[in-house]
Image: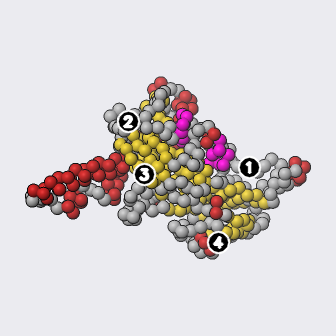
């Protein structure tokens, strides 16, 4: 798996380079103003038929997202250009339906030691081959796969082939010179977002480095999204996989991708649900509403009324550890106070006092290897049932059903331990 880990590291570095951009700056001619972002996610790593059985796994819940249990997360970020005393204070008063207390304190994180850039000197072009497939189809379509072979590409050609569609850059609040930055979660208040928490209601952000109180409301459409729930997954590595999911009411579009390593040839294999060639590296994140609409029009993102997709047969035949990663995009909420005037002349004199962005997504994953094992177990169980019936009729049944059930490893937890090595 060394080549797999190395390739993923290279891809992450390239993505960071390709999608990096300049830091945020206020609109030309306008005075700088505070910016507040709420990043809202629902994450569900459940699998069909497993939700009730999966217990908490100490130390691994964060890595796996908590199989069988949908989790909600919230990340709050504030930038303000205004100065204050050394005792910086700001807090986000939340509605009672969040069930997380009255307020969430926003703290400025401690300054870290200056980092050093690694990998910029003595960089060597990675050596590997990647086969890229795309489209929801049970069979491989004509003209696929596209082969990315670094031995036959310049680093520029490799970057272009890997990049895919470039979403509009987003610059969330962050530490920067001349500005105050604060965030939550932090060490002052450690609390998990409750499973039945809701954002609906009035939100108030105030502090001694804000020129004005930030006050706004969140409605049902911009509340935590429903979790990704796969309603059926069937197939195998040779015939391909078909998966379906429950429609998410507030979703604006969907995207899915899977990547693995061919154990025989050493090649990487990538598949995306896009109807046109796209590696999807920039799409498994929060996207603006305009980007979602644009990519749906370009047939890269699946429309919100889509509820099923298929992975072509044979592309992962010699691969293991294959998992489909899935994302549902939410309707991004953008607020500005005072509202931007429609009249061009009035707009010239207009200057925001503050802006707020609430961005949403719901993510999930399904392990295809697990689904194939389930199919095999079900077939084996049917065969054993026939044998048992035959033995009962002949009066020579000697098998213990409980022992057989344990031996076949029907517990999803046992199977997951084998897949992920814990």
Label 3, residues with CA under 10 Å away: few <14, some 14-19, many ≥20: some
* Nearer the observer, 408 or 259: 408
Task: Report if the CB atoms under discs 2 and 1 are less than 8 Å apart.
Answer: no
Q: For mark 1, give the secondary structure.
A: loop
Real-space Cα separation, disc 3 to disc 1, in angstroms:
46 Å
Of the numbered discs 1 and 4, the one sitting upstream in the chain is: 1
Q: Which residue is mark 3?
A: 232
Q: Which residue is mark 4?
A: 95
Asked if residue 232 shows in the view, the reply is yes
Of the numbered discs 2 and 3, the one sitting upstream in the chain is: 3
Q: Which residue is mark 2?
A: 314
Majority SS type along the magenta span: loop
Q: Please report the bounds of the magenta region as a residue range.
A: 274-294
* Nearer the observer, 294 or 244: 244
The residue depicted at 41 percent of the width and 55 percent of the height is 47
Say which mark, if any, is on residue 200.
none
Q: Which residue is mark 1?
A: 25
Answer above or below: position of 336 versus 256.
Answer: below
The residue depicted at 59 percent of the width and 38 percent of the height is 299
């Amino acid at each position: 798996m060394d080549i797999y880990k190395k390739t993923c590291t290279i891809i992450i570095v390239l993505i960071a380079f390709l999608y990096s951009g300049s830091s945020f700056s206020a609109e030309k001619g306008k005075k700088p103003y505070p910016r507040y972002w709420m990043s809202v996610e629902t994450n569900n790593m459940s699998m069909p038929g497993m939700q009730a059985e999966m217990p908490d796994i100490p130390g691994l819940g964060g890595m796996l997202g908590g199989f069988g249990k949908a989790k909600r997360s919230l990340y709050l970020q504030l930038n303000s250009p205004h100065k204050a005393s050394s005792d910086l204070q700001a807090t986000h008063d939340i509605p009672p339906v969040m069930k997380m207390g009255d307020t969430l304190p926003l703290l400025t994180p401690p300054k870290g030691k200056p980092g050093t850039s690694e990998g910029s000197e003595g960089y060597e072009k990675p050596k590997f081959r990647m086969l890229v497939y795309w489209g929801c189809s049970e069979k491989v379509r004509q003209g696929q796969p596209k082969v990315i072979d670094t031995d036959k590409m310049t680093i520029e050609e490799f970057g272009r082939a890997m990049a895919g569609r470039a979403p509009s850059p987003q610059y969330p609040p962050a530490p920067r010179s001349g500005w105050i930055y604060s965030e939550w979660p932090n060490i002052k208040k450690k609390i998990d977002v409750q499973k039945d928490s809701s954002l609906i209601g009035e939100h108030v952000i105030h502090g001694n480095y804000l020129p004005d109180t930030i006050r706004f409301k969140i409605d049902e459409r911009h509340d935590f999204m429903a979790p990704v729930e796969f309603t059926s997954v069937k197939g195998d590595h040779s015939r391909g996989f078909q998966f379906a999911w429950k429609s998410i009411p507030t979703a604006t579009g969907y995207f899915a991708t899977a990547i693995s390593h061919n154990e025989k040839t050493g090649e990487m294999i990538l598949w995306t649900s896009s109807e046109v060639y796209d590696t999807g590296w920039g799409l498994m994140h929060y996207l603006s509403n305009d980007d979602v609409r644009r990519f749906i029009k370009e047939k890269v993102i699946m429309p919100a009324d889509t509820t099923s997709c298929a992975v072509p047969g044979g592309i992962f035949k010699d691969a293991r550890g294959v998992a489909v990663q899935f994302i549902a995009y939410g309707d991004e909420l953008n607020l500005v106070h005072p509202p931007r005037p429609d009249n061009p002349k009035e707009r010239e004199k207009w200057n925001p006092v503050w802006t707020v962005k609430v961005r949403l997504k719901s993510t999930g994953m399904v392990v295809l290897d697990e689904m194939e094992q389930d199919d095999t177990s079900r077939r084996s169980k049917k065969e054993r049932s026939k044998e048992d019936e035959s033995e009962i009729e002949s009066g020579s049944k000697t098998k213990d059903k409980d022992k057989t059930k344990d031996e076949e490893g029907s517990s999803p937890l046992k199977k997951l331990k084998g897949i992920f090595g814990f």
